[in-house]
């Protein structure tokens, strides 16, 4: 029997019954309320806005308490989220309030990734709740719900329009959390400018498809007031914890030389409206929307991503139980993790491979170069040897020539001594002629090479 | 909770161990959230599922009619033309009743044929399987990817067990049944047809029953281990002294001393149902409807349902997984009647209680 058939059958069976007496179950809501009082309430607010725009002051003013908050610095390298939990008690209602502040939002020079830590934080809270819900042994009634119920977005009071950073951040947050836009430090804008500014902001939001939180108008008791408030969005707020005496009362206000801005005066700012809407009228609705809309959306996306489906093959309903709930969720997570590791390993291997290849190529080139160098060296060596050879030959020749010259000289001097002077003269002359003739025989080149001394003239 | 992925550079868990209590310097309006809750409750309405178990002729149908002051069952007299049911059948009927703008969707499940056979062995099986079937349905709905906004709650919140007025002590059938059922559902035993016992006999019977329950470690509603604080303890111990209530049911009105009251007319007098001197019907009604209805639902949801879920999820790991695996192994009552892993703790600051014997 499928679920649909069962519910249909049940619907057919349901009929109204008239009672003929007083049973007494109108105390049921009181029983519910008593139980809630026992358990206590939980409310989480996320404040997004630039440093110094007045987030902490507004929260202090809203809850009429001085939460310990130090001034944040403007020099954070990235956006961080800081969450603090407080326990408030008013008569018999205990409220566990968590305020999450964005530290360093809008302070960086490059603001591209500013919205990312915020989105990650919200997703982390949903993830924690989902994991708790999927556990086998779970304790949901005891669970400290840390999911963000409302996001107060502080818009700077420029008077012109939304800034790109604001638009980008709100667009990325609108499907994850209830956004209530506020105009911060509203005492810097005059009334007429404020009206124009509000209209401009709302039209820009609508134009860009940003879904801000609409106060619910389906219940008769709150429909009228909620509907009216919807028209006053974004609320222009002023926060202050200082008390100034006006008349005979002490009121929270900001004192300027030109006047006093009263926080709780409806003519001065929309603070009272914000408090009314946020706390007195719609706190429960905000929590419900977070749980039934935003959380369910996150859960659906996450589970579909993990591969769970409601309708398996052959169109039969497939239950998560059949695939072993929590274990499969964890197993799939492990799988993805393992897959990532594997891919990393693969890439590492590829890298190592490439490096090896490149090395081989380079080594090859080196070897080639070396071979060339050797070859050249050899050639040079050969040439030098040849040259050496030639020199030696030349040296030998010169030696031979100088020997011949020596014998020639000897021969000349001998003939001079034997024949006397005339004969000597003739013989000398003959010798000299022979020597000169011999010298003439030598080519000019050889003469130069051997550095022959000119023939002796003094022999005449 | 041990495996968290590496988180972005922000503290993503709020600093809960140190939650300083802060003083509010004036009125903020947090109280208004109670009104918001009330409005929401009025809008969504309430659901209540009750099951009556007992042998035929003990006045179950009449009792239901008296409790809700209306004809829940078309006729409380059995249809004598039809043969007595040979096996135990469960018979469920749903109504919407409204009082002072508050809507209550009431489902009453009757069990004709319980304990009527010669051999009543395992007559509690169909009942247990019905209860588990409701849990199963809720679990399936909860595990869907695309869930409904409000999951229809058909789980049995309370089981009223009618003990026949023998005057002696609990019979073996009663003991077996109570023992098995009080682990799965909130059980409220009542002494049926209490007009056949005198006041002294009633008291003696009651104390013997209480002793029997203690001997066999049967924990009936309101369970001692779920008392949250001192007020609860006081209130519940008073109730525990009176369990089981001696009740009489009637849906006819008679004239007594000029007033029109519900009662049974006999030759020797009129037994007024709503008279505390005559019977303890008012106590039962107050317990079930006026003071502990929400508590019954809470315990069903937080304890019994969670126990079932743990069992079921542990079990499903033993199922083979494969492509296209569709159907769950049918949850047979035999598997699930093994003693549970112990009641889930309701509050973290309470010491864990031992599992019952």
Image (cartoon, helix red, strand yellow):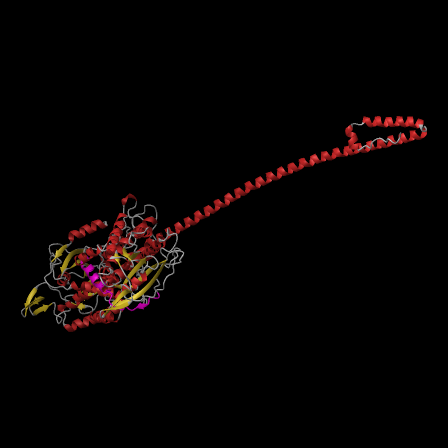
Q: Residue B248 or A121: which is nearer the viewer? A: A121
Q: Report the quarter where the C terminus of chain A lies.
A: top right
User: What's the magenta region?
Assistant: B17-44
Q: Position of residue B137 (x, y in %)?
A: 25, 54
Using the image, determine if residue B342 lies above or below residue B152: below
Q: Is residue B133 above or below residue A67?
A: above
Which residue is more in the foreground, B336 or A442?
A442
Q: Is residue A336 visible?
A: yes
> Does residue B357 appear in this view?
no
Quarter location, residue A384: top right
Residue A148 in which image quadrant: bottom left
How many numbered circles are shown? 0
Residue A400 image point, x, y percent: 82, 32
The answer to whether residue B68 is left or right of residue B323 is left
Q: How far across and how far down the image is residue A20, in percent? A: 9, 61
Q: Residue furthest bottom?
A: B200
Residue in front for this viewpoint, B197 or A352: A352
Percent coordinates x, y for residue B49 in the rendering: 20, 59
Residue A209 painted magenta: no
Magenta segment includes B23? yes
Q: Quadrant of residue A459?
A: top right
């Amino acid at each position: 029997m499928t679920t649909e058939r069962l519910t249909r059958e049940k619907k057919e069976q349901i009929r109204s019954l008239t009672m003929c007496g007083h049973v007494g179950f109108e105390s049921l809501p009181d029983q519910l309320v008593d139980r809630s009082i026992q358990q206590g309430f939980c409310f989480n607010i996320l404040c997004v806005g630039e440093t110094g725009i007045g987030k902490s002051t507004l929260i202090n003013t809203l809850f009429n308490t001085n939460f310990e908050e130090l001034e944040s610095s403007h020099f954070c390298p990235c956006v961080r989220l800081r969450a603090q939990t407080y326990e408030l008690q008013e008569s018999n209602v205990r409220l566990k309030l968590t305020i999450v502040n964005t530290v360093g939002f809008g302070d960086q020079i490059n603001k591209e990734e500013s919205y990312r830590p915020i989105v990650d934080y919200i997703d982390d809270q949903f993830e924690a709740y989902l994991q708790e819900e999927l556990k086998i042994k779970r304790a949901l009634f005891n669970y400290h719900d840390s999911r963000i119920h409302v996001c107060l977005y502080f818009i700077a009071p420029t008077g012109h329009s939304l800034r790109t950073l604001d638009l980008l951040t709100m667009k990325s947050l609108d499907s994850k959390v209830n956004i209530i836009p506020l105009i911060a430090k509203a005492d810097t804008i005059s009334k007429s400018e404020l009206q124009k500014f509000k209209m401009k902001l709302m039209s820009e939001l609508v134009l860009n498809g940003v879904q801000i939180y609409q106060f619910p108008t389906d219940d008769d008791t709150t429909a009228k007031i909620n509907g009216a408030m919807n028209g006053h969005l974004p609320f222009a707020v002023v926060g202050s914890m200082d008390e100034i005496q006006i008349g005979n009362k002490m009121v929270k206000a900001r004192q300027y030389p030109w006047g006093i801005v009263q926080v709780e005066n409806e003519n001065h700012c929309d603070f009272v409206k914000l408090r009314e809407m946020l706390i007195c009228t719609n706190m429960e609705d905000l929590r419900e929307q977070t749980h039934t809309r935003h959380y369910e959306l996150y859960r659906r996306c996450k589970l579909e991503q993990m591969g769970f489906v409601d309708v398996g093959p052959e169109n039969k309903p497939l239950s998560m139980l059949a695939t072993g709930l929590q274990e499969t969720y964890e197993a799939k997570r492990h799988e993805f993790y393992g897959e990532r590791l594997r891919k990393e390993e693969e890439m590492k291997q590829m890298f190592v491979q490439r490096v090896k290849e490149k090395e081989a190529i380079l080594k090859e080139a080196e070897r080639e170069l070396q071979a060339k160098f050797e070859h050249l060296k050899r050639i040079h060596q050969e040439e030098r040897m040849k040259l050496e050879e030639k020199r030696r030959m030349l040296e030998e020749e010169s030696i031979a020539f100088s020997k011949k010259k020596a014998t020639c000289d000897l021969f000349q001097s001998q003939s001079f001594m034997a024949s006397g002077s005339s004969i000597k003269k003739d013989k000398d002359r003959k010798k000299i002629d022979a020597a000169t003739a011999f010298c003439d025989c030598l080519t000019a080149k050889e003469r130069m090479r051997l550095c022959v001394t000119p023939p002796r003239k003094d022999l005449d | 909770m041990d495996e968290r992925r590496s988180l972005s550079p922000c503290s993503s868990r709020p600093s809960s161990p140190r939650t300083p209590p802060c003083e509010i310097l004036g009125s903020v309006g947090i109280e208004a959230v109670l009104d918001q809750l009330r409005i929401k409750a009025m809008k969504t309405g309430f659901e209540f599922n009750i099951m009556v178990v007992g042998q035929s002729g003990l006045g179950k149908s009449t009792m239901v009619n008296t409790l809700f002051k209306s004809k829940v069952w078309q006729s409380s007299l059995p249809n004598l033309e039809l043969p007595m049911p040979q096996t135990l059948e469960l018979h469920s009927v749903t109504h919407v009743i409204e009082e002072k703008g508050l809507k209550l969707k009431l489902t009453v499940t009757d069990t004709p044929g319980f304990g009527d056979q010669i051999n009543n062995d395992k007559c509690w099986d169909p009942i247990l399987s019905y209860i588990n079937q409701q849990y199963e349905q809720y679990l399936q709905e909860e595990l869907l990817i695309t869930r409904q906004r409000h999951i229809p709650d058909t789980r049995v919140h309370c089981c009223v067990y009618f003990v026949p007025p023998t005057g002696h002590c609990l019979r073996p059938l009663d003991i077996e049944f109570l023992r098995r059922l009080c682990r799965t559902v909130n059980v409220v035993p009542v002494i049926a047809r209490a007009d056949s016992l005198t006041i002294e006999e009633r008291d003696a019977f009651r104390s013997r029953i209480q002793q029997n329950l203690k001997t066999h470690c049967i924990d009936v509603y309101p369970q001692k281990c779920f008392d949250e604080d001192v007020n609860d303890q006081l209130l519940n111990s008073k109730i525990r002294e009176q369990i089981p209530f001696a009740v009489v049911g009637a849906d006819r009105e008679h004239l007594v001393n000029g007033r029109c009251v519900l009662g049974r007319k006999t030759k020797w007098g009129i037994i007024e149902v709503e008279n505390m001197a005559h019977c303890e019907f008012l106590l039962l009604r107050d317990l079930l409807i006026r003071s502990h209805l929400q508590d019954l639902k809470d315990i069903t949801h937080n304890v019994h349902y969670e126990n079932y879920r743990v069992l079921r999820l542990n079990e499903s790991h033993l199922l083979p997984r494969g492509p296209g695996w569709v159907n769950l192994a049918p949850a047979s009552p035999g598997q699930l009647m093994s003693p549970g892993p112990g009641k889930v703790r309701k509050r973290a600051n309470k010491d864990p209680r031992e599992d019952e014997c």
